[in-house]
Image (tube, rainbow, N blue to C red):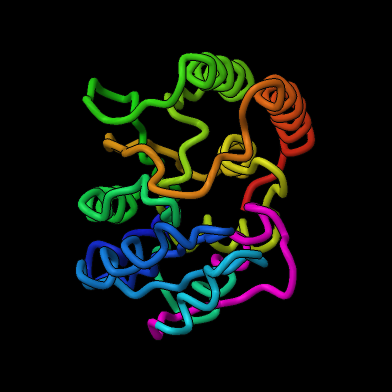
Amino acid sequence: MDTSNTHLNKHHLNVLVIIPAYNEQESIVSVVRSVITAGYDYVVVNDGSTDETLSICDRNGFNVLSLPQNLGIGGCVQAGHKYALLNGYDVDIQFDGDGQHDVAYIPSLVEQIRSGSDLAIGSRFVRDSDGFRSTALRRMGIVWLSLWIRAFSRKRITDPTSGFRASGKKAMALFCKNYPTDYPEPESIMLAIKSGLSVDEVPVTMRERQGGKSSIGGLSSLYYMVKVSLAISIVSFSHRHKRI
C-alpha cells in the first residue's frame, strides 16, 4: 500500500497559494488581500505583465516572483510549483489572479490532499451550484474534454479546465519536471493520472473574472479543443507505462 501521504494526517500542512498573474491590474490587489486575510502564505507569479500588475504588487509590498518574460500560463504555474517545492511546502494551491476563485474553498482542497489525493481539482460541476459556469460554448468544450479524458483514463473529471486546484508533494514534483505549456489544466490532469497519481474533485463555486480578459474565445475555443484533445491523446499513449 502506498503510504507516502500518511504523514499528512499527523501534522499541520504548510500551504502556499500560487497566484499566476498576467495583466491583472484591476483585480490583483483584492485577490492577494483575500489570501492574506485568510492567513495563507502566497506568491504572485508575474508572467511578464505589460500593464501595472508588477508595480502595483511592488507598491503594496506583495511577495512576487517576477518572470523575465511572458512564459504563458504553463510556465508561470510551473515556476510556482518550483517555488513551493524549493521552500518546503506540503501543498500548493493554484489560485487565479482574476478574482474568479474564492479562498473559502481552499480548506476543502487542502483536506482532499490530506485525505490522500495527490491532485485535487476545484469543480463547478461535481454538484449543482449557483456560481459562474462560463458561456454555453465553453461549457460544451468542458463536457467534450471531460469525455475525452474519461475515454483515455477511465477517470471522470467534471471540470478539467478548472485552474483552482491543490497539488500535494508528488504532484508538485511531477509538475516541476514536466508541465504543459499552452493550456495546461486538462493535459496536466491526464499527465497526473497516467503517472499513477490520485486525482479527485472538490465542489467549488466560482465568480466571473473581476478584470483582464480571457485568452480563449470565439474561434480560438475550437482551436483550443482540438489542440488540447490531441495533447491529451499524446500524453495518454506516451505515459502508459510510467509511474512516479
Residue range (magenta): 60-81
- Left or right? Give the position of 226 relative to 31: right
Residue drawn at x 49%, y 72% is: 84
- Left or right? Give the position of 51 relative to 203: right
The question of residue 80 being in magenta is answered with yes
In the depicted structure, whether residue 58 falls above or below residue 239: below
Question: Which of the two residues, 35 or 23, is positioned nearer the viewer here?
Answer: 23
In the depicted structure, whether residue 180 falls above or below residue 23: above
Q: Is any atom of residue 1 visible in this view?
A: no
Question: Which of the two residues, 43 or 213, is positioned nearer the viewer here?
Answer: 213
Question: Which of the two residues, 232 or 134, is positioned nearer the viewer here?
Answer: 134
x then y, percent, for residue 189: 56, 39
- Left or right? Give the position of 168 relative to 132: right
x then y, percent, for residue 154: 53, 20
Residue drawn at x 27%, y 34% is: 203
Q: Quadrant of residue 192?
A: top right
Residue drawn at x 41%, y 43% is: 209
x then y, percent, for residue 225: 67, 23
In the depicted structure, whether residue 152 falls above or below residue 23: above
